Amino acid sequence: VPVAGTLLEFVAATFLEAEDAGAEAVVLETDLTELEDAARHSPEEILSRIERLEEGMQQVRKERERDLKCEESDHQFARQAGLFLTGAEAKTSALTNQAREAERAFLSMCEYVGEKQCNPEDVFGTILAFVHTFDTARMKMRGKAGASS
């Protein structure tokens, strides 16, 4: 194992040593590809967008009811809207549940780092910077290991 000059290089060298012993390679930049997206979107923003989607679906429900009440209609819209709503309601409900779970996980992560609330851009931006720095240190240590072989 090459001599590490920093704690980060030591951690990277430890990962490389484990990989050489047969452990699965970890490349954080490729393993954590969603970090940039996570930094741009807060759980509240996602829930707000889902709420707007539900409001649109409510409008479709109203129009469907209006079509069903109309005696001159062939009710084609109502049939198609009913099919749409059946599928969309289940998907929207699942999205809402996932978004609420993500919000709980994010708040838990904020508490873990000592904050009651935090900004996704700050938290995930910091993690993203660490990931980049870690992978750079890992490549540097791999280069040192190759040079000493």
Image (cartoon, helix red, strand yellow):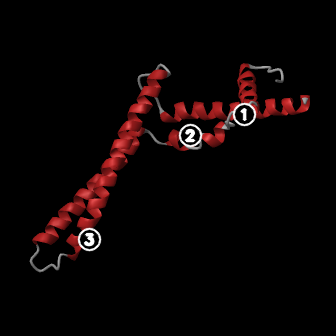
User: Quick check: 92 above or below 22?
Assistant: below
53 and 147: which one is in front?
147
Say the numbered circle drawn on residue 61. none
> Which residue does the numbered mark 3 point to in the structure image?
80
> Which residue does the numbered mark 2 point to in the structure image?
35
In the rendered image, residue 100, in percent from the top left (x then y), is placed at 35, 38
Query: Residue at position x 38%, y 37% from top?
Result: 101
Whichever of labels 2 and 1 marks the residue nearer the N terminus, that label is: 1
In the rendered image, residue 145, in percent from the top left (x then y), is placed at 85, 30
Q: Quadrant of residue 31?
A: top right
Whichever of labels 1 and 3 marks the residue nearer the N terminus, that label is: 1
103 and 122: which one is in front?
103
Query: Residue at position x 73%, y 24% from top?
Result: 14
> Which residue does the numbered mark 1 point to in the structure image?
22
Q: Quadrant of residue 33?
A: top right
Q: Amino acid at mark 3?
A: Gln
In the rendered image, residue 57, in percent from the top left (x then y), is placed at 27, 58
Q: Distance between the Cα atoms at labels 3 and 2?
A: 39 Å
Q: Amino acid at mark 2?
A: Leu
In what element is the residue under mark 2? helix
In what element is the residue under mark 1? loop
* Category of crowding for the residue at label 1, using alpha-carbon neighbours closer than 10 angstroms: few (below 14), some (14–19), many (at least 20): few
Query: Residue at position x 65%, y 40% from top?
Result: 29
Quarter of the picture containing the C terminus is: top right
Q: Is residue 53 left or right of residue 39?
A: left
Query: Residue at position x 78%, y 35% from top?
Result: 139
Q: Is residue 35 left or right of residue 106?
A: right
Q: Amino acid at mark 1?
A: Gly
